[in-house]
Amino acid sequence: MAELVLSVPMSDRGRSAIAHLQEHGERDLGCNYARALTDRLRSLRSAEFLQHWPHSFHLVRVADGDQVRASNRILRWHDGEKAEHGFVETAEPNVRLALSANQSFQFRLGGQHGAYLRQMRHNQVPPGSTGAGVQVVVVDSGLDTSAGITPSHFYDVESTPPGPLRQIADGTGHGTAMATLIREIAPGAAISVVQALDPTGNLPLWNLLAAIPVAVYDCHAAIINLSVGCAGFPNRCSICGATVQARLLGFDKMLEGIAKVPNPAVAGPPIYVAATGNEQANAGFNFPAFQSETVAVGAVTSAGVRSSFSNYGTNGHKWYLMAPGGEEVARTVTEDVGSVVTSQGSVPYFGTSVATAYVSGMLALLRSELRYRNMPRDNFLDKVVQDHCELAPGAQPIEYGSGQIVYVKAPAAAAVAAAGASTPAVKQNLTIEIGDTWVRIGGVTVPRRH
């Protein structure tokens, strides 16, 4: 059996559609109603908030190979024009999103990681800026506690209800690698993990729709790291033959719900950070990076050149930027951020997943500073692309977006950045020198903290 994900208005017409699917779906449409998202998240705080969203979400099962035709049948029968059938707004296959870096069982930092930190001018971060007070949620494969990271929260959406769980684990190691890289950038940030992969090692759309509200309402996310993605796929109408590109419509509806009903414990909706993907595509990003509400992250090399595998080509994405992610030439890895142990042995670790984690860490670092702490989310992200991204001369925005994220743009003095950070102000007549491991202010040298 295959599955479809439905977005249904929270209205009488929407309830009528669900009643029809439950009672007559198999007879009229060749599908079987499975469950509602609220049922899956029962007993969690997020389930309460979902009741106030403009849409509800549902899963139905159809025969393998019948997803597109079944989707069209459901939408025709529930177009809102006939009261007895009601209204279904979107119906799309339960696509599987893939990890945007190789799976691993143990991640070891190394390779170009130190150089990448300097490339992002992380060595100019003042000691008081650590990401403290910012909650970053990694929606991924889980967490291996041997990495030395104690999560603020840990949920597993493959369980019903999803938790919180005392048993913390990581089936592939990818989530652990992402959390490790985020901690390297923002050591003071709180990190939570939502395990969302299915037994095949992929992340179904249905799991993503469960993971996001858990991250928002149960983990209190300020930033959500999504180092996963899937390409668009054709959706052909069996009546007129027209073809459109599927685009995770349910995910869009979910973001609308979160924007309308934000977590009152957090200032506004979270920042969604997603990988553009590793398919060497020049015609657009993977989803959900394609969605306009995300921060889309591509990868660059140590030379600041787009990594050959990094997808690009989406015009007009307002928050598209780059971060180091490694490089692979003719199937030979020439840059990485360390190594991982897999079933094939130790291999280099690279990808737009890496770049995404770096950006999540940098955003946490900046968000924690006094100058940005109380700024509305969209204004903050606009400020990041304006003041913390560098577009190299001659680089095209369709390929590089706003450029590579950096803590401070060259040749701005480090004192400019320090003036806005959550550290004591320094008099202008003092000289300031900053090294990788030290800061000298007015002749007094103190160690740097990362």
Image (tube, grey):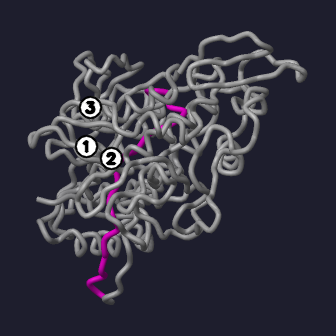
How far apart marks 2 and 3 lie (CA) works out to: 11 Å
Q: Nearer the viewer, mark 1 or mark 3?
A: 1
Name the disc covering residue 380, or none.
Answer: none
The part of the image, by quadrant, that contains residue 198 is: top left
Q: Earlier in the sequence, mark 2 or mark 3?
A: 3
Graded by Cα atoms within 10 Å as few (under 14), some (14 to 19) or many (20 or more), the crowding at tag 1 reads many
**Horizontal arrangement in the rendering, residue 158 relative to residue 351 (left or right):** left
User: Residue pushed farthest right?
Assistant: 429
Q: In x, y percent, where is residue 363?
A: 57, 37
Q: Is residue 138 magenta?
A: no
Name the disc covering residue 350, or none.
Answer: 2
Q: In x, y percent, where is residue 205?
A: 31, 52
- Part of the protein shown in magenta: 218-239
Residue 413 seen in render: yes
Query: What residue would you read off at disc 3?
Result: 107
Most foreground residue, 306 or 86: 306
Q: Amino acid at mark 3?
A: Phe
